[in-house]
Amino acid sequence: MLTKAQEDLFTFTEEDMAAAAARYATPCFVYSLDLARSRWRMLRQALPGRVRLAYAVKSNPGAPLLETFAAEGAWFDCASAGEISAVLAAGGTGSGMVVAGPAKTHRDLQAALYAGARVQVDGIEDVERLQELHTGEAPLRVSVRVHPASGVSESASIIGGAGPSAFGVDEEDLGAFLAAARHHDRVAVTGLQVFSASNELDPGRLLANHRTALRIGQAMHEEHGIELELVDVGGGLGIRYAASEPSLDIWALGAGMGRLLEEHPWFTGELLLEPGRWLSGPCGVYLTRVVRVKQSRGVRFAMLEGGINHLLRPLLTGQSFPVTAPGRSGELTAYTLAGPLCTSLDRLGTGELPVDLQGGDVVAFGQTGAYASTQAMSHFLSHPEPAQHWLC
Ligand SMILES: Cc1ncc(COP(=O)(O)O)c(C=O)c1O
């Protein structure tokens, strides 16, 4: 039985999740495209007009989701040739696409150029390769990704924190990078990307990151004479994984972004926000059945059909997805959630489930529309991949 505080951690009501588990073979993912559309519209409404919105495809590249966002006029943040083709197939356009990645392959760069996307360069090597590959008349307009020296919100395990980074040009090396880039007449740096947050629930901390981006942009403008047309502040908008967590106030975020634009009159271009998780995460649930329940030395295990082959994130971040047993009421107790894989790594964290949980019962994991089906070890131990069902 879900409490009021837990309700928005799950896309569907308990009755609908129980009905979906009866209708579809488990394990499976079930998504709501209606919710994706309404979250897109709500976020769009909360942001000033000068903030463009690109969906970060990596959070969930499902074709129906990409089609839903493309129909809303979304831009897309892609990180591989595969993501670029998925977006084009879904009706997105190259002119509304940014392509990022710390080690872009030749194929990625060619796909980006072919699509007409804006490439975010991560170093002078990217510029050198684009100088060779670009055949258009006018110089190719690119953005440079900068790794700030300080003022970064942490999330070190995902994004890299303030220390050494695989991403971008270190801020202290930006002057040298820009000087070197000027020797490449077929490439023009007209954009900036700074992104250092992940799953952030505090709008103030996201805005601090955005402020850092504009500070770096101002230096590019004043010291290097660059008219920036795009300042990309990445994604990182967080969602609740537990009933005790607050929701991110997107209205405060939008108002803060508006104020930042006013504080930087030198900047006449657009800000780009690239959320993935906030848009797709709440739109999906993962349904699986209990195979058996076991007690071991005082710990109660719920052994499930699916594990890190379907949901790897809890193992990577130490944070469980919210879990419930749809349609079941009664006393709850703590379980360690384990999957079917022959490795003690196969843990989905912990959760409160009914004391009398049994083999065959359904459990649902909420907030699994993002970084779930795509961020899993689906081939490990050769279990079938879970089906994905897209509801309107
Ligand atoms: C360049 C870039 N943009 C956007 C995102 C999306 O982040 P989130 O899903 O946290 O909003 C990521 C995530 O890693 C990223 O690397």
Image (spheres, helix red, strand yellow):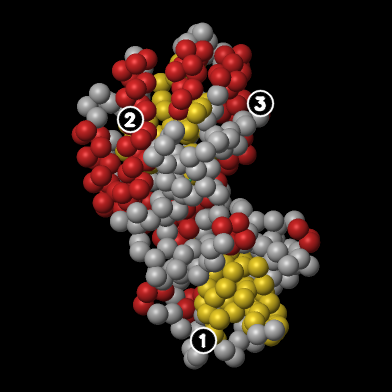
Report the side of 230 relative to 106 (left or right). Answer: left
Quarter of the image where one finds residue 75: top left
Label 2: state its secondary structure: helix
Where does residue 16 sit, x and y in percent of width and height? 48, 76
Residue at screen point 41% across, 52% down:
200
Residue type, label 3: His
CB of mark 2 near ligand 1 (< 8 Å): no
For disc 2, the marked residue is 215
The label shown at residue 106 is 3
* Disc 3 element: helix
Comparing 353 with 186, the one in front is 353
Mark found first going from the N terminus, 1 or 2: 2
Neighbourhood count class around disc 2 (C-alpha, 10 Å): few under 14, some 14–19, many 20 upward: few
- The tag earlier along the polypeptide, 3 or 1, is 3
Which is in the foreground here, disc 1 or disc 2?
Answer: 2
Residue 191 sits in quarter: top left
Checking the image for residue 332, the label placed there is 1
